[in-house]
Image: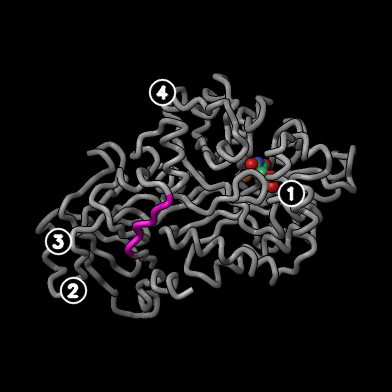
């Protein structure tokens, strides 16, 4: 743990002081990730002024405002600064693992076959139901620490392995507890519409009516839900079933997201867009109409190269079309025991480039600016600009392209979160 603790530094006193707490971070190459300017929004030989945990100014050499004379300055010896990373799609709270299923797939079984035979998500559901909230927290902490250890300042966590009201609440409570145990922003998504639990086999409508919808109400009443998610797929829920879930989310004023077009094109992204979705995620099988709908709704396309890799998917998401339509593209780990047992956003960036042909700049935007937007946090985090939270990752690299370039390397120097 000591390695991680050394990375958890911050501006400890900023919230408790009457006088504004100011600090200057200097001698940095700053990838602000602000769009519209130079590549990566790069500021060479830059400095950042932080006041009470908020970015006050960003400037090139000698550009510090004159009334900041005498403020504490910390020198970073020319290192690269980026926004703290954002993992906008994870399932890090779960019990057990699925290594045996990995073996079965290597012996020829497909992900869908295993799911239909009662394995897959449902086997993780049994393992998750068997754990207490405390045990779920213990199981998830090492995964969260690995993300933090690579510079993550915000991590989204989904429920979806409980599939009873109580077990979904237990997962969400565990996820929120993680945010109390570590200096990281946790966003929780309610994903009871992830799979049909065995006790509801053949009775999807009853499951929605008896668990998913009332569970959403209960979780919202307890303040545990930032967004509502679902898995729209032949092995999960149909668009009509998802519509019921989203109608309920709308009445509760909750934004929505959707696992869509991962294994087939059911029109999930289009449905999600019609509800103004924050994002549609996976999208390998997304068609032209889906791209157009997402563009119109302003939804983010969250690509998940870890699942693409681990399931040996052959179909590529329509990156060129998304790009041409101006749909913002995010990247995330999708960390989960079945389709993406991966806890590295840097590896997701590398895979996004090698598999999906994103540029390293798009990959970095995918784990900062666009990931923030996929969580509805675009006004708070994701770029380095005045008014946003002072949440940074400082890297031992010369150029931002190096972050997506190496495989399995972690050049994080320090993570700074206010
Ligand atoms: N799609 C995924 O890739 C994960 N969930 C989903 O809806 C897989 C979850 C699992 O296999 O446990
Ligand atoms: Fe997922």
Closer to the camera in the image, 235 or 158: 235
Residue at horizontal 69 percent and vertical 55 percent from the top: 97
What residue is shown with label 4? 324
Distance from Cα at disc 1 to Cα at disc 4: 34 Å
| Disc 4 secondary structure class | helix
Position of residue 390 measured from the top left corner of the image (x, y, whole percent) = 34, 62
| Disc 3 secondary structure class | loop
Q: Give the range drawn in magenta.
A: 408-413
* Front disc: 3 or 4: 4
* Res. 274 visible in picture: yes
Distance from Cα at disc 3 to Cα at disc 4: 38 Å
Position of residue 171 measured from the top left corner of the image (x, y, whole percent) = 70, 61
Q: Does the magenta stretch include residue 409?
A: yes
What residue is shown with label 2? 71
Distance from Cα at disc 2 to Cα at disc 4: 45 Å
What residue is shown with label 1? 192
What residue is shown with label 3? 64
* Front disc: 1 or 3: 1
| Disc 2 secondary structure class | loop
* Front disc: 2 or 4: 4
């Amino acid at each position: 743990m000591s390695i991680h603790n050394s990375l958890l530094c911050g501006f400890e006193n900023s919230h408790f002081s009457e006088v504004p707490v100011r600090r200057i971070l200097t001698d940095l190459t700053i990838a602000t990730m602000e769009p519209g300017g130079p590549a990566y929004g790069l500021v060479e030989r830059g400095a950042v002024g932080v006041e009470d945990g908020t970015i006050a100014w960003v400037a090139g050499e000698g550009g510090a405002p004159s009334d900041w004379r005498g403020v504490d300055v910390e020198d970073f010896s020319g290192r690269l600064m980026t926004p703290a990373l954002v993992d906008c799609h994870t399932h890090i709270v779960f019990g057990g693992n699925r290594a045996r299923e990995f073996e079965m797939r290597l012996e020829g079984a497909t992900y869908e076959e295993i799911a239909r035979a009662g394995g897959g998500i449902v086997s993780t559901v049994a393992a998750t139901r068997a754990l207490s909230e405390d045990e779920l927290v213990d199981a998830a902490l090492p995964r969260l620490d690995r993300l933090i250890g690579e510079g993550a300042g915000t991590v989204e966590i989904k429920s979806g392995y409980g599939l009873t009201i109580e077990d979904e609440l237990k997962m969400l409570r565990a996820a929120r507890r993680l945010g109390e145990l570590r200096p990281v922003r946790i966003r929780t998504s309610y994903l009871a519409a992830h799979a049909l639990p065995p006790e509801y086999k053949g009775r999807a409508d009853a499951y929605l009516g008896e668990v998913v919808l009332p569970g959403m109400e209960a979780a919202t009443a307890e303040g545990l839900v930032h967004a509502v998610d679902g898995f729209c797929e032949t092995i999960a829920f149909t668009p009509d079933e998802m519509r019921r879930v989203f109608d309920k989310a709308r009445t509760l004023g909750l934004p929505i997201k959707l696992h869509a077009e991962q294994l087939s094109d059911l029109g999930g992204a289009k449905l999600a867009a019609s509800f103004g979705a924050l994002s549609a995620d996976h999208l390998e099988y997304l068609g032209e109409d889906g791209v157009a709908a997402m563009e119109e709704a302003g939804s983010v396309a969250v690509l998940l190269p870890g699942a693409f890799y681990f399931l040996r998917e052959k179909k590529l998401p329509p990156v060129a079309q998304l790009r041409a339509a101006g749909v913002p593209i995010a990247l995330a780990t999708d960390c989960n025991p079945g389709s993406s047992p991966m806890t590295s956003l840097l590896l997701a960036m590398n895979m996004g480039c090698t598999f999906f042909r994103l540029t390293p700049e798009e990959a970095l935007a995918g784990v900062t600016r666009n990931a923030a937007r996929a969580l509805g946090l675009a006004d708070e985090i994701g770029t380095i600009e005045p008014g946003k939270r002072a949440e940074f990752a400082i890297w031992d690299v010369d150029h931002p392209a190096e972050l997506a370039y190496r495989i399995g390397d972690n050049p994080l120097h320090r993570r700074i979160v206010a």
